[in-house]
Amino acid sequence: MKKILFAFVLLSASCTTSRTTTVTNLNSPNTVIDGKIFATAYQQRSAEYRALCYQAFNIARFRIDQFNMQSSSLPKAIMTDIDETVLNNSPYEAHQLLKGKDYEDASWVEWTSKGIADTLPGAINFLQYAASLGIEIFYVTNRGEKERSGTLNNLKKFNFPNADNEHLLLKGNVSSKEERKKTIAQTHEIVMLMGDNMNDFSFLFEKKSPADRTKVADNFATDFGNRFIVLPNPVYGDWESSLYHFNYKLNPAQKDSAIRVSLDTY
């Protein structure tokens, strides 16, 4: 029955590769908007969220000390995502959600252009420490070219190391980070990857179903807390998109149905 309902949801709208606006009646319960409000509150107000961030960067520091003792013919580098990995965009999420809206391209660019996002707990200290060891930091993000200035200003505001054009690799024509990773690997040994989305670590997660993403994660089990450092993001990501089969044209009711059908119960 779940499969039949989910198939109906997917057939009722055509697929696309870009996110679209979700707007809901503020007086009507909505799983997507209400759920993201709850998740944003967790991100902004819970000590547990901060603890998870500190835990990730503490592990990263321990691992980077080990990697730094290993010899390499190339300079060492860390490849890190930006959003919800080193910069906290929860004020943007709250701004949108409290108006009954989800992500929008225009409002997102307006936000990033301000360059005022705060940092994740522990991010600056860790990356500055890694840089002090001679390790270069590459910021590989799916922000667009028109966001370059605001992004660099935001990173420089908090004295993130290597906050310059050479080390900021923006989206370009494709969202996959695989080619940008290969470009870095031509001149550097990437000893660590950091992100909040599995696509930040491997192309093998891209456009996969929740079940397939889980299988790939299991295959990388020994890399997490080793070469891969994952930061918590309960608000958005491919974990959410995969529930809709990456069909961003679904309306709020269809997304609600897709989420509910995906849940295990007894």
Image (cartoon, rainbow, N blue to C red):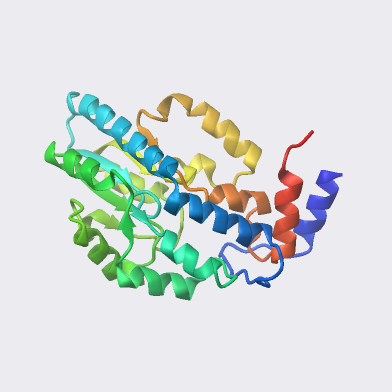
- Residue 35 is left or right of residue 231, and the answer is right
Q: Nearer the viewer, residue 245 or 152?
A: 152
Residue found at x 82% / y 45%: 2
Examine the rendering and report whether any part of residue 187 can be seen.
Answer: no
- In which quadrant of the rendered view does residue 132 lie? top left
- Residue 31 is left or right of residue 4, and the answer is left
Which quadrant: the C terminus? top right
Image: 246 above or below 24: above
Residue found at x 72% / y 57%: 256
Residue found at x 56% / y 65%: 19
- Residue 258 is left or right of residue 147, and the answer is right
Q: Where is residue 59 in the image (x, y as percent from the top left)?
A: 32, 30
Q: Where is residue 236 in the image (x, y as percent from the top left)?
A: 53, 54
- Residue 149 is left or right of residue 235, and the answer is left
Residue found at x 63% / y 55%: 246
Q: Position of residue 234 (x, y in %)?
A: 52, 48
Q: How many marks?
A: 0
Image: 258 above or below 68: below
- In which quadrant of the rendered view does residue 111 lie? bottom left
Q: Nearer the viewer, residue 76 or 237?
A: 237
Which quadrant: the N terminus? top right
Image: 49 above or below 258: above
Q: Position of residue 197 (x, y in %)?
A: 47, 46
Q: Nearer the viewer, residue 74 or 251?
A: 251
Examine the rendering and report whether any part of residue 255 can be seen.
Answer: yes
Q: Nearer the viewer, residue 261 or 166?
A: 261
- In which quadrant of the rendered view does residue 91 lie? bottom left
